Amino acid sequence: MGGESRVSDEVLGTAVPIGVYWLYSGLYCLLHRLDCFRMHSRKEEAAKNSISKATVVRGVLLQQSIQATVSLALFAFAGNKIEDQPVSEDSILAYAMQFLVAMLVMDTWQYFMHRYMHHNQFLYRHIHSQHHRLVVPYSFGALYNHPIEGLLLDTVGGALSFLVSGMSPKASIFFFSFATIKTVDDHCGLWLPGNPLHLLFKNNTAYHDIHHQLYGSKYNFSQPFFVMWDKILGTYMPYTIERRMDGGLEARPKKVD
């Protein structure tokens, strides 16, 4: 009998989050037909977004190809070293601590990089503004960024999360798949009743939608999990969810007394 072929954890850690991205965003594309839960009307989406969906798909595929290359290189550099350490990831508590550390590292890196890209006029005009061509976000546009931004913000942020947390390639499959689901959900443009991510995280679809509007471009920089840095550094913009006159929902800035 021949030996069994097995896909390595490193390959799965690279490929699975990409598959999750397209499957989860595809689900939201189907749900986008539910106009009563949309945060922007179809007419508003067509009028405000200055980029075609075909261009967005090509841009996301380019970014994912770069991420995959860096991911495989990172695993090759660090994977064996991590696996040679005493195995403790079988413990649920150990997994939870690794995930929490990774989430905090990713949030910290992305907050300060994201905020700097808004405040530096050169970086915003030539790099970050590409993401904001989607004034009305939708699911598969979550990773539509300039390649340099994708490398600095997402790929480097993910690499730091992986290295600092000390998670194994196997654990990274679950962490980066979850981070992908969270990012897609934040950009989906739908406020669905009972969405568990909206219940667990204040950094959610409405919070991020505020940031994509002109009045919110200097607020709500945190992504993808918590809002702590916005609240600590005074860049948090509270909001309310209200029904639009023409149907659907809308996130509106909340006046603070």
Image (cartoon, grey):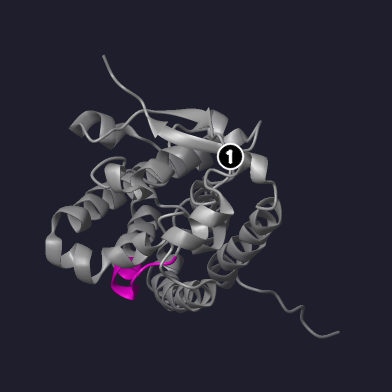
The C terminus lies in which quarter of the figure?
Answer: top left
Q: Amino acid at mark 1?
A: Asp
Does residue 132 appear in this view?
A: yes
Does residue 176 appear in this view?
A: no
- Depth order, front residue of 79/111: 111
- Residue 217 is situated, as x and y percent measured from the top left of the image, at 27, 47
Residue 145 forms part of the magenta stretch? yes
Q: Residue furthest bottom?
A: 2
Residue 4 falls in which quadrant of the image?
bottom right
- Please identify the dominant SS of the magenta region: helix
Q: Which residue is mark 1?
A: 246
- Mark 1, Cα crowd under 10 Å, few <14 / some 14-19 / many 20+, is few
Residue 80 forms part of the magenta stretch? no
Magenta part of the protein: which range?
144-151
- Residue 191 is situated, as x and y percent measured from the top left of the image, at 58, 38
- Depth order, front residue of 77/11: 11
Above or below for 16 versus 196: below
- Depth order, front residue of 33/113: 33
